[in-house]
Image: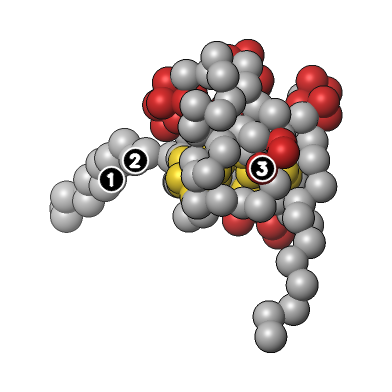
Amino acid sequence: MPAEASPARATPTAPPRDPAPARVVVCRDCCCGTPKIVGVDHAAQTARLRALVPVRVSECLDVCEQANVIVVQPSAAGRAAGARPVWLGLVNDPDATEDIAGWVRAGGPGVAPRPDILDLYAITPPRRGPVS
């Protein structure tokens, strides 16, 4: 009698990763991230975000009057759901930094509802005219 084939052993695998997760863009140029915004530890804010979520540091985002500016970019799933980047200004409080990181970790725009408290920081992105 032929021996039965043994079932293949299942190997544990990590859960699938989003190929393009939600992330934050932190402005760190002429006003954001500089001593012009007094009383904010800009390096600590950036480090804290980097410890929790994907971060990209940007040059000037052209809304200096709203410094510190953070843009939350939707994940691939969020974009597929129709989400657009969310611009947040005057992010100068550690609690706001934590709220942003929590939202991004939950999935960000288009995946997780924006915490109501972040409505206080929402700004309109700058309009850029056509390039001549």
Determine whether, in the image, residue 82 is placed left or right of residue 58.
right
The residue to which callout 2 is attached is: 13
Q: What residue occupies the far bottom of the structure in this picture?
A: 132
Amino acid identity at mark 2: Thr
Note whether 49 is above or below 8 in the view shown.
Answer: above
Q: Is residue 105 visible?
A: no
Tell me whether the residue at label 1 lies in contact with that at label 2, contact meaning CB atoms closer than 8 angstroms: no
Element at label 3? helix
| Local crowd size for mark 3, using a 10 Å CA cut-off: few (<14), some (14–19), many (≥20) | some
- Of residue 52 and residue 62, the one placed in the foreground of this image is 62
Residue 119 seen by the camera? yes
Q: Secondary structure at mark 1?
A: loop
Which amino acid, mark 1? Pro
State the image quarter where residue 13 is shown.
top left
Residue that badge 3 annotates:
64
Sequence-earlier tag: 2 or 3: 2
Tell me the CA gap for discs 2 and 3: 45 Å
Please tell me which residue is depicted at 70% across the width and 29% down the height of the picture: 90
Few, some or many C-alpha atoms within 10 Å of disc 2 (few <14, some 14-19, many ≥20)? few
Q: In the rendered view, would you say 107 is above or below 79?
A: above
Mark count: 3
Find residue 117 and report its horizontal and vertical position in percent: 79, 20
Foreground of the two, 5 or 22: 22
* Mark-to-mark CA distance, 1 and 2: 18 Å
